[in-house]
Image: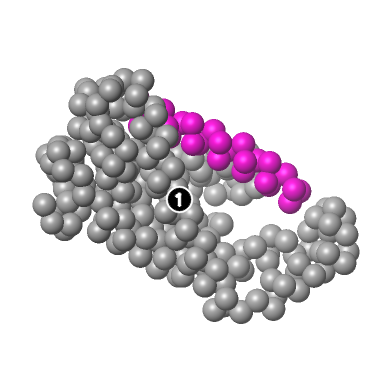
Amino acid sequence: MSFFKRLEGVFFGPTPMFRSLAEKPVWIDALVILLLLLAAFSALTAPYTQSDQLKMFKDNTKLQERMGEARYGEMIAKFENASSSSAVVKGVVWGTAMGAIGLLFSSLILLILGRFISTQGNYVGVLAVVVHASFIDKLLGNAVRAFLIMTRKSVMQTSTSLAMLFPKIEMTSPAYIILGQFDLFQIWMFGVLAIGLSAVFKVSLRKSLFVAYGFWLLKSVIYVVLGIIGMSYLK
């Protein structure tokens, strides 16, 4: 099955597509294209991320007291003097590297979770499913996010999660961080991922939904804890 047929299957016919993929896992071409999409998204949003970070750190008296005036001044000067091109390069390298690591590590965790419900399937099969399901979030989801970011001129003020329904919530608050985990494209992606895991592990969709959304819950809890800890240093 060609890449474009597989991509079409992700959005319009996941069940037969993933059954075929489970029989003959193919993932390298999809991974390369996925990483190129991540690189393009990172390059596009890097200048806005840089601007958001400067606004967040600038005039933060508590952060200044914690770091000391000298270190704080150096950090602000570094952000103010950083060129857009360097921000793009760093964004592309960081975004692509973290994207690749995330896909590989997520596949390993899903395989481990899958062993609780099945002895079938292997790492390559799970990786192929994860890579293809990720196009829902990294292609369609990031396209929507990129449009919103360019419209609002901000990454932090852009969301495709339940947080967008509460525009008055402070972005550094625990409530915003929790709501941010309920991203519409991520929830869709994990549902499609469950269909693929069902084919790989050769189990019912009900069991694979438990694995897919169990992983989503685990990931969300970790992100919430790290997010709250990180934001506490900015208050």
Q: Name the amino acid, label 1.
A: Ile
Magenta stretch secondary structure, dominant: helix
Tell me the SS state at disc 1: helix
Q: How many marks?
A: 1
Task: Please state if 54 lies on the left or on the right of 15 as rendered.
Answer: right
Tell which of 142 and 37 is nearer to you: 37
**Which residue does the image show at 21% across and 49% down from the upper left?**
26
- Residue 215, image quadrant: top left
Does the image show residue 158?
A: yes
- Residue 124, image quadrant: top left
Relative vertical location of residue 80 with respect to residue 114 in this rendering, above or below: below
Task: Please state if 27 lies on the left or on the right of 48 as rendered.
Answer: left
Tell which of 4 and 12 is nearer to you: 4
Does the image show residue 144?
A: no
Tell which of 15 and 200 is nearer to you: 200
Find the magenta span and give its range: 210-235
